[in-house]
Image (cartoon, helix red, strand yellow):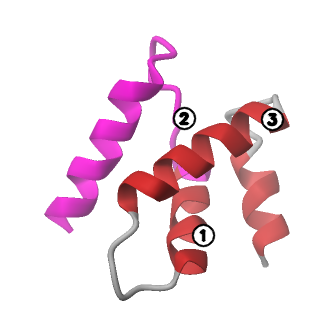
Amino acid sequence: MRSDLIYGALTHISNRYQLCQLASKATRKLHKPNTRLQDTTNEVLVRFHEASPMGAHGDTKVALEQVSQQRRAA
């Protein structure tokens, strides 16, 4: 369920508003045509649970670029 993914992502981001902002930016960057937007959003939340989307220094732009590079490699 998506609520489980959201609570998992909150382990790295304590502010829910910031989580929504980062998830929407990442979803827009990572979404591929002809795929469901819901699946892309779920994938973003899983990635946020596995690693901090803020990066080591809180730089969200660098973190989003790294995620996008990982997705291209997969």
Taking 27 as reference, is 39 above or below it? Answer: below
3D distance between C-alphas at marks 3 and 2: 16 Å
In this view, the mark in front (3 or 2): 3
Q: Amino acid at mark 2?
A: Ser
Taking 54 as reference, is 40 above or below it? Answer: below
3D distance between C-alphas at marks 2 and 1: 16 Å
Q: Identify the mark nearer the N-term, 3 or 2.
A: 3
Magenta stretch: helix, strand or loop mostly: helix
Q: Quadrant of the N terminus?
A: bottom right
**61 inside magenta stretch:** yes
> Which residue range is magenta in the image?
48-74
Mark number, residue 42: 1
Q: Position of residue 57 (x, y in %)?
A: 46, 11
In this view, the mark in front (1 or 3): 3
Q: Amino acid at mark 1?
A: Asn
3D distance between C-alphas at marks 1 and 3: 17 Å
**Residue on which disc 3 sits:** 17
Residue drawn at x 37%, y 59% as measured from the top left: 30
Residue drawn at x 58%, y 66% as measured from the top left: 41
Name the outermost residue toward the left: 73
Secondary structure beneath disc 2?
loop
Mark number, residue 52: 2
